[in-house]
Image (cartoon, grey):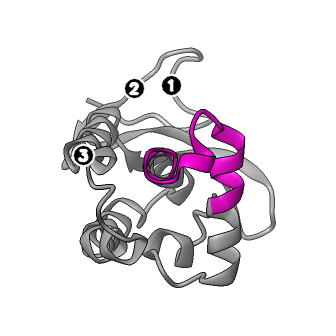
């Protein structure tokens, strides 16, 4: 199998494969002069992203309303740090898109825990945003730039 990049191979032919949680396929890149070109680059695979979301659901945060936000951070931070070190190494923006799901899960936890946030999606995200601006190092994903 030949991995074709821009300027080589037939136009419209799509070559991609998964390996160790990454999908290798032609993606847009920028050279040292700032010009865009197509290169064969890895990013988090759809299967790995689905597994991350499944793990987040498996934490069953909505049933952890007896815990504080700091307790949730203590549970999640080592795992999120590992995901970002592994999957965020190449094409980080794809990994960031998956971790936004975790912010939504924390907002859902807040809607279940606090009566004033029930049935108020936007208010729960704003509440989370205020906490993220007040304590930006509470969750590792906030420290890495994935803010609500």
The reply to whether the magenta stretch includes residue 144 is no
The image shows a total of numbered marks equal to: 3
Q: Is residue 28 visible?
A: no
In the picture, the quarter occupied by the C terminus is: bottom right
Position above or below: 135 against 145: below
Sort mark 3 into few (<14), some (14-19) or many (20+) by Cα contacts within 10 Å.
few
State the CA–CA distance, disc 3 to disc 1. 47 Å
- Image point (70%, 69%), residue name: 130
SS label for mark 1: loop
- Image point (45%, 74%), residue name: 139
Position above or below: 131 against 4: below
Q: Earlier in the sequence, mark 2 or mark 1?
A: 1
Sort mark 1 into few (<14), some (14-19) or many (20+) by Cα contacts within 10 Å.
few
Q: Which residues are magenta?
A: 108-127
State the CA–CA distance, disc 3 to disc 2. 38 Å
Q: Position of residue 51 (x, y in %)?
A: 23, 40
- Image point (32%, 41%), residue name: 53
Q: Position of residue 136 (x, y in %)?
A: 60, 81
Which residue is under mark 1?
9
Residue extending farthest to the front is 115
Q: Position of residue 63 (x, y in %)?
A: 26, 47
Task: Tell us which disc is closer to us: 2 or 1.
Answer: 2
Which residue is under mark 2?
15
Q: Which is the main secondary structure of the residues drawn in magenta?
A: helix
Q: Is residue 102 visible?
A: yes
Task: Tell us which disc is closer to us: 3 or 1.
Answer: 3
Q: Earlier in the sequence, mark 3 or mark 1?
A: 1
Which residue is under mark 3?
60
Who is closer to the viewer here, 91 or 66?
66
In the picture, the quarter occupied by the N terminus is: top left
SS label for mark 3: loop
Q: Are marks 2 and 1 in contact (CB under 8 Å)?
A: yes
């Amino acid at each position: 199998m030949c991995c074709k990049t821009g300027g080589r191979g037939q136009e419209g032919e799509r070559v991609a494969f998964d390996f160790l949680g990454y999908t290798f396929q032609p993606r847009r890149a920028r050279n040292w002069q700032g010009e865009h070109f197509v290169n064969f680059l890895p990013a988090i695979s759809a299967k790995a992203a689905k597994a991350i979301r499944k793990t987040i659901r498996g934490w069953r945060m909505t049933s952890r309303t007896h815990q504080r936000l700091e307790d949730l951070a203590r549970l999640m931070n080592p795992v999120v740090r590992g995901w970002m070190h592994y999957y965020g190494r190449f094409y980080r923006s794809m990994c960031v898109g998956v971790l936004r799901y975790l912010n939504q899960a924390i907002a859902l936890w807040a809607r279940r825990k606090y009566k004033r946030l029930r049935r108020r999606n936007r208010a729960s995200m704003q509440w989370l945003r205020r906490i993220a601006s007040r304590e930006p190092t509470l969750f590792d994903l906030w420290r890495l730039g994935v803010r609500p």
